[in-house]
Image (cartoon, rainbow, N blue to C red):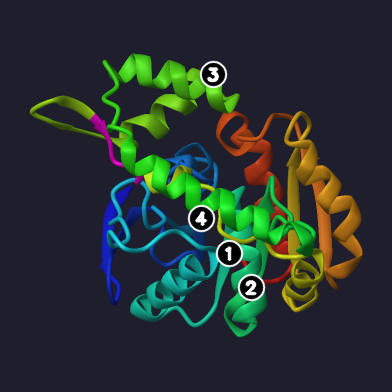
């Protein structure tokens, strides 16, 4: 494993690179409030793969957005585009978990010429709401932004306590929670502190309508693999059932595990990935 860092136009993005530099190129995007350590267990089971797992802006070791900015899906899509230009990657496999899977679906629809395959783990396109809910959504978002500025930053008492809290909040094993927490913590004169930008906890200003989400999914031209956990999020399962017909070339499978199955049960997930890439003739 190698720590990596790239300067984008306005922020520095960091991450971890695993495997064979001459192997199959895979860009991996983690979930909300996670980081690139999300893919450490999976990387151990992927052979002949050049896996680049990044910390999304606002997460892990990557920069935060400026004080007058917030976090929106299109901005993360732009971050990924800038990163691929910096890397010189013309074509690659895109792999995303949860929020990373949502971003990956938008990216694959927006820049289809770059994507060899798309894999979404515990995700199936963007979340959506009825158009009529938009005023209330925006109100809640603005108020949440004001409220977060009033709160003092929290300092976890210890790595172990932080891992326990993460484990209970995220329905994942202690080992997986510890991997995530270690990369999301730093230390200053007051003790441990979270690297994660707390503005990530504010409410989104707008949600896509289902019509907009449909347009993105229909624009994905690459082969798609959707992996869900046997005890994963029910909303993901429902989205997959309702939207599966929108994707031209879809394979869907279920592996044992919860929302973080790629961490807690990585081997069968890796087997599905390697088989998918091989079947697509792009491994």
Q: Say whether disc 3 or disc 2 marks the residue closer to the N-terminus.
A: 2
Q: Which residues are magenta?
A: 193-197
Point 57% across, 80% down: residue: 114
Can residue 88 be found in the magenta stretch?
no
Badge 4 is on which residue? 29
Which label sits in the foreground, 1 or 4?
A: 4
Mark 2 or mark 4: which comes first in sequence?
A: 4
Residue under circle 2?
108
Residue toward you, 211 or 171: 211
Q: Position of residue 172 (x, y in %)?
A: 57, 25
**CA gap, disc 1 and disc 4:** 8 Å
Which numbered disc flags the more N-terminal residue, 1 or 4?
4
- For residue 96, side relative to residue 211 (left or right): left
Can residue 48 be seen in the rendering of this structure?
A: no
Tell me if label 1 and label 2 are in contact, CB under 8 Å: yes
Residue receiving disc 3: 168
Q: In whole angstroms, how far apart are the C-alphas of marks 2 and 4?
A: 13 Å
Badge 1 vs badge 4, beta-carbon distance below 8 Å: yes
Q: Secondary structure at mark 1?
A: strand
Mark in the foreground, 1 or 3: 3
Q: In front: 19, or 181? A: 181
Q: Nearer the viewer, residue 80 or 250?
A: 80
**Viewer-proximal residue, 123 or 173?**
123
Q: Secondary structure at mark 2?
A: helix
């Amino acid at each position: 494993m190698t720590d990596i860092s790239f300067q984008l136009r306005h922020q520095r993005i960091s991450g971890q690179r695993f495997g064979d530099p001459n192997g199959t190129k895979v860009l991996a995007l983690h979930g909300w409030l996670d980081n690139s350590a999300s893919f450490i267990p999976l990387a151990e089971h992927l052979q002949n793969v050049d896996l680049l797992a990044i910390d999304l802006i606002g997460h892990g070791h990557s920069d935060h957005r400026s004080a007058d900015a917030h976090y929106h899906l299109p901005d993360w899509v732009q971050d990924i585009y800038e990163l691929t230009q910096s890397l010189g990657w013309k074509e690659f496999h895109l792999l995303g978990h949860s929020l990373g899977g949502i971003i990956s679906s938008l990216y694959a629809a927006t820049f289809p010429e770059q994507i060899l395959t798309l894999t979404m783990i515990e995700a199936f396109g963007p979340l959506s709401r009825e158009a009529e809910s938009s005023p209330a959504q925006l109100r809640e978002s603005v108020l949440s932004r004001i409220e977060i500025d009033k709160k003092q930053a929290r300092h976890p008492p210890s790595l172990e306590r932080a891992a326990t809290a993460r484990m209970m909040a995220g329905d994942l094993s202690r080992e997986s929670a510890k991997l995530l927490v270690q990369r999301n913590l730093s230390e200053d004169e007051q003790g441990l502190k979270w690297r994660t930008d707390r503005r990530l906890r504010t409410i989104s200003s707008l949600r896509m309508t289902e019509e907009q989400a449909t347009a993105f999914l229909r624009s994905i031209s690459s082969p798609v693999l959707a992996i869900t956990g046997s005890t994963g999020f029910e909303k993901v399962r429902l989205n997959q059932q309702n939207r599966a017909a929108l994707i031209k070339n879809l394979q869907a499978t279920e592996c044992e595990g919860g929302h973080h199955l790629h961490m807690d049960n990585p081997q069968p997930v890796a087997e599905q990935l390697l088989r998918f890439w091989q079947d697509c003739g792009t491994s």
